[in-house]
Image (cartoon, helix red, strand yellow):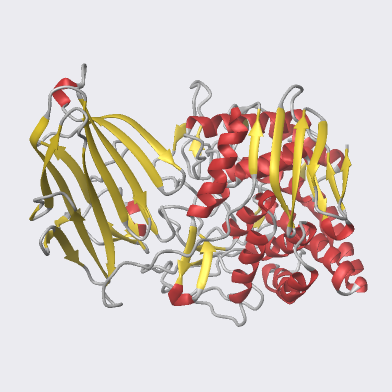
Amino acid sequence: MSGATVCVSTHAGEIEPEGFEGLFHRDVRVLSQLVLTLDGRRPALLSAQRLGASAAELVYVAAVDEFANPTALLLRRREVGAGLRETLTVRVFSGALEGVELRVGLGTDFADLLPLKHTVERAPSEPLVPHGAAGVRADGARFGIAATLDAAATRAERGALVCRVDAAPGRPWSTTLVVEPVDLHAGGGADPPRDAAPREQLEVRSSARRWEESTASAVADLHGLRVEAPRYDLTYIAAGAPWFMALFGRDTLLAAWESLLLGPRFGLEVLSSLARFQGREVDDRTGEQPGRILHELRTGEAGVFGVPPGTPYYGTVDASPLFVMLLAEVHRWGAGDDQVRLLLPAARAALRWCVEFGDLDGDGYVEYAGDVDGLVNQGWKDSGDSMVHADGSQAKPPIALAEVQGYLYGAYVALATLEERLGDPAEAARLRRSARALQDAFVRDFWLPEQGLVAMALDREKQPLAVASSNPGHCLWTGLLDGEVGAAAAARLEAPDLTTPWGVRTLGSGEVAYNPLGYHIGTIWPHDSALVAAGLVRAGSFDAARGVTEGLLAAAERFGWRLPELFAALDDLPFPIPYPVACSPQAWSAAAPLLLLRTMLRLEPDVPAGVVRCAPLLPDGMEVTATGIGLGAGRLDLRVRGHEVEVLAAPPGIEIVVG
């Protein structure tokens, strides 16, 4: 993937017309078939290796009938930029391959992206037709797709490019396939090359390979998800490929928080983009309200929930408090006072939305009633069946989610800190009183001592959803739950119905509604588990946090170091199970290893105060060296062995407090 262009293929590298694979460009599948054959037979895959976010290398046995004793290999290097580029090389080790026909089958359906996720039926793939001397092309309503092969004597046919392979030992044969989307409304040509974004400097070396691989993958994928939308003069980190190549509120805010080891720049970009589209008026069609932070902005060709592309949809209740939390956190990580002051009015407006619009009945909680034409559930667990009672029945809105009250508490505290430092100290005191009042009310209404758990939510009758869920872990993370109740909530999260060897389930396996492959009712979401791990550390449950961390890193290894959007775990299977249509990569899953590392280092900067605290929780004997941790415009380099910390470099004027 590269920006708005995403390639999804089978493990063997093919794009099959019957599947949901494809080359996607701005939410349109511009290529729905890409199949290679040699003399009419598909080469047999030996190896497939992802190389960062935008490239892959695949190796095949060139002659299928020689699979047990191959004499020739086909190497296929795939790169995604504005389009798709494949370098095809045949290497022969004995004998020769002369006159073998290489055929590249190409087709398109120009299908809109989102319906592909939810339907099995596919429109027939239309073949690309000859165009020019050695190319094929097809045009849709908005985009065209053109392909060329640079081999000598290439022949263009209906639905294919064909050439002849001529290779012998010591004389490899090579050709390049180029596939380019064409913007028909811009006079032709692919998108211009993307400007190089600033590369993060973070590098992790460790005695545990999992830290190195997972963090390197995180940085590469976050860079790959960077989308430029020149029509809207906007650059952003998309929520996930291929389904959510859009600017999201909650997802992007949490991904930025998770990624703070890279420094505050990403967070500031996210905050600035979201502030630009912050609600200013009441619009029932889009859910816009003054101060509200958007849920989703599509910049491709497909809108969402009846809202056209380029117009935000606002149906979320958690993005607004998370916006406030992130602004205070990037300040702690070294964002300049002037940069933060520019965004302070937006943060005040976002918290004002929580109180004036988010609290539907004046009880102090942020709730949602749902949208008839949009999302019924408007927290991060936004599928239609996610809000369940203990008997399995669906809760009736308005619904007050546990974790959203945690974010609201975090927003009160965050804005209070900013007001103390940059604004109005009297307002800061009022905000802290509001935070304490919310905390007292939450324990009264959400804590269920008889069951020993925190309710997932309250329904419209203020009845608790008394089910074991991951949601309370977010309340530990923000500090809403602490003391004895916090310790009890942490202990409940550690129970085996929630915590697995691979992460934390969204819903406990003992619940009536539990489904290990249900989108939000039993699967494991890496970002969710990473936030739970951070919450467990804040609650003092260090061993449990280490267990969740090790589980997620083990899952990352199983998934080729790229944590998907979500996956499943069954108690009787010793491996995680892929979710069929999960985004991979997804921004907040990609960033999860970075938050896990920060959590295990217990790294808490406060650059305005001139101090960084570090009290690591690594197992004895484990070593991690992290260089290029971003603090403002400077960098921090640390070497950690178990609980010991060696400061290799730090910005001037910053005191590192260990322990």
Residue 289 lies, with reference to residue 35, above or below; the image says below
User: Relative to the observer, which residue lies in front, 108 or 3?
Assistant: 3
Residue 213 lies, with reference to residue 361, above or below; the image says above
The quadrant holding residue 129 is: bottom left
- Residue at 16 percent across and 30 percent down: it is 168
Quadrant of the drawing holding the C terminus: top right
x and y, in percent, of residue 362 in the image:
75, 69
x and y, in percent, of residue 108 in the image:
21, 57
- Residue at 21 percent across and 17 percent down: it is 69
- Residue at 67 percent across and 40 percent down: it is 596
User: Relative to the observer, which residue lies in front, 362 or 473?
Assistant: 473
Asked if residue 470 shows in the view, the reply is: no
All told, the count of numbered labels is 0
Residue 339 lies, with reference to residue 161, above or below; the image says below
x and y, in percent, of residue 570 in the image:
50, 27
Q: Is residue 211 left or right of residue 439?
A: left
Q: Residue furthest bottom?
A: 281
- Residue at 29 percent across and 77 percent down: it is 185
Asked if residue 48 shows in the view, the reply is: yes
x and y, in percent, of residue 49 in the image:
39, 35
User: Relative to the observer, which residue lies in front, 22 or 454?
Assistant: 22
Q: Is residue 305 left or right of residue 295?
A: left
The quadrant holding residue 437 is: bottom right
The quadrant holding residue 420 is: bottom right
Q: Residue furthest front?
A: 170
Q: Residue furthest top?
A: 68
